[in-house]
Each structure stands twice: as structure tokens, then as C-alpha cells.
Image (tube, helix red, strand yellow):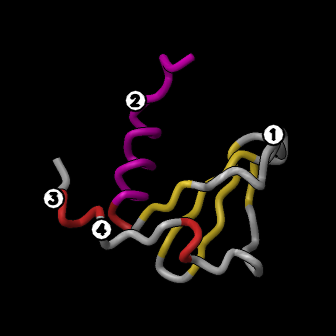
Amino acid sequence: MPDPSHLSQVPKPHDLDLSGAIWYAAPEAPEGPQVAFVGEYIVMRHGSDPSAPPLVFDQDEWAAFKSGAAKGEFDNLT
């Protein structure tokens, strides 16, 4: 489990300048999840509502997310 003090180190979406972000999406699902690499952070948003607050991950959180996805940890979500 992550150290709770770590959570205060990840910036809030409004603390990042996303104006120049390049958003990446799966070609077959451009309105699905989109990610951008902003400085040392990874930002994720939903392509069908880009004005909604995005999620912000640090490098360790992103690595854990990718690892979980590769292992199928999200396969049973509806």
C-alpha cells in the first residue's frame, strides 16, 4: 500500500499546465481513455468529455497501473 504522505506530492489537475499537452488514444477508440505526458506526470482523461477533471499519476503509479492492466486486473470491470 502506498505511503499516504506520497499522495500530497502528486499535483492536482488544476496545478498542471495542460494547454500544450499532446493526448494519445487508441485509434479505434478516440473517445475512450486518453493519456498525455506532462513533465514527470502522466495525465489521463476521457476523450468524450475532455473538460472533466483528469487523473494525474506519478511515474510509480503509472507503472503500477500498466502492470495491473497487463495482468488483466481490470478485465472484469463493467
Residue at image coords 30%, 68%:
8
Residue denoted by label 4 = 8
Q: Position of residue 54 (x, y in %)?
A: 61, 55
Seen in the picture, residue 39 relative to 61 is either above or below; the reply is: below
Measure the C-alpha gap from mark 4 to mark 2: 26 Å
Q: Nearer the viewer, mark 3 or mark 2?
A: 3
Residue denoted by label 1 = 29
Q: Give the residue type at disc 1.
A: Ala
Q: Nearer the viewer, residue 66 or 35?
A: 35
Measure the C-alpha gap from mark 2 to mark 1: 20 Å
Mark 3 residue element: loop
Q: Nearer the viewer, mark 4 or mark 3?
A: 4
Q: Give the residue type at disc 2.
A: Glu
Residue at image coords 60%, 72%:
37
In-image side of 29 versus 10 (left or right): right
Give the mark nearest the N terminus, 3 or 1: 3
Q: Nearer the viewer, mark 3 or mark 1?
A: 3
Around disc 2, counting alpha carbons within 10 Å, would you say few (fewer than 14), some (14 to 19), or many (20 or more)? few
Span shown in magenta: 61-78
Q: Give the residue type at disc 4.
A: Ser
